[in-house]
Image (spheres, coloured by chain):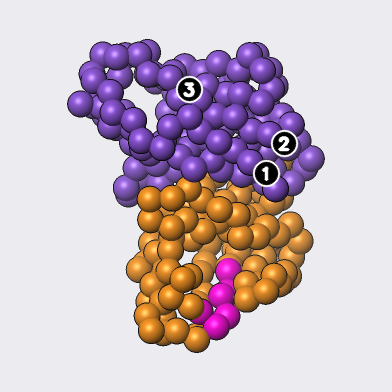
Chain colours: A purple, B orange
Amino acid sequence: DVKVTQSSRYLVKRTGEKVFLECVQDMDHENMFWYRQDPGLGLRLIYFSYDVKMKEKGDIPEGYSVSREKKERFSLILESASTNQTSMYLCASSLTDGTDTQYFGPGTRLTVL
Amino acid sequence: QKEVEQNSGPLSVPEGAIASLNCTYSDRGSQSFFWYRQYSGKSPELIMFIYSNGDKEDGRFTAQLNKASQYVSLLIRDSQPSDSATYLCAVNSGTSYGKLTFGQGTILTVHP
C-alpha cells in the first residue's frame, strides 16, 4: 500500500512565524503535491514537484515556498504565517506511469492566530 | 481555465438505494478520471479511476465515462450510511507532471 505521511495532524502557530509542513512518501513516487482545502473553495494546488530539487508553482503559490532535497520528502514552508493561511493542508504523491493517480496523506490542520 | 463541475448537493438517498454522482469537465485532452471519497475532517481516499469510455465496476461502485459528452459519473449500489461523505471528481490532462483538477465535491448523505 502507498503510504504518505505528514508531520503533524494539528498545528497552531502565531502570525509572522515561519512554519514547516513535511510530507514523506514511501513508494518512490516522482511527483509530489501540496494542496490547501477550504470550505466552499475545494482543493487548491499550491506547489508541486516532479523530481528532486524541481518544483513548479500551482494555482496559489503566494506566501508559500517548497523544498524537495530527497525524493521521498516534500516540504511546504510558510515564510511568515498569516491568519488567511489557516486551512487544511494536504500532501499527495503519484508515480509517473501515465495513470496520474494521486495518493493523499492524512492532512495537517493549521491554525494561525 | 480547465474546469471540473460537480453538483455540490447535498444528495440524500435512503439506505439500500443507488446513489448517482455526476461530473463534467471542460478539457477535451483529459485522459484519466478519478473518484475520491472524503469523510469530514479526513483526507481524500481513492475509490476508483477510469480511462476508457464505458463502465468500470469495483464492488458496489461503478464509474461511467463518456468522453464525447465530457461526462463522468459514479454509481454506488446498495448505499450504506457509511457511504455518507463528500465525493470528489478529479481529471488530468496528461501533460503536466500528473497534475489533477478537482471538482468542488458532492456531499452524499445515506439515511437509514
- Give the CA distance from mark 1 to mark 2: 6 Å
- Do badges 1 and 2 share one subunit? yes
Instruction: Identify residue for label 2.
Output: A27
| Of pointers 1 and 2, the one earlier in the residue sequence | 1
Position of residue B56 relative to residue A29, above or below, is below
Q: Relative to A11, is A26 on the left or the right?
A: right
* Tag count: 3
Give the residue type at disc 1. Answer: Val
Judged from the image, the secondary structure of the residue bearing numbered disc 1 is loop
Residue B75 in percent (x, y) is at 58, 74
The 10 Å Cα crowd at callout 3, few under 14, some 14 to 19, many 20 or more, is many
- Give the CA distance from mark 3 to mark 2: 20 Å
* Mark 1 vs 2: CB contact within 8 A: yes
Question: What's the magenta region?
Answer: B74-79
Direction right: furthest residue? A97
Judged from the image, the secondary structure of the residue bearing numbered disc 3 is strand
Residue A29 in percent (x, y) is at 71, 33
Give the residue type at disc 3. Answer: Leu
Q: Relative to B51, is A60 on the left or the right?
A: left
Q: Residue A2 carries which label?
A: 1
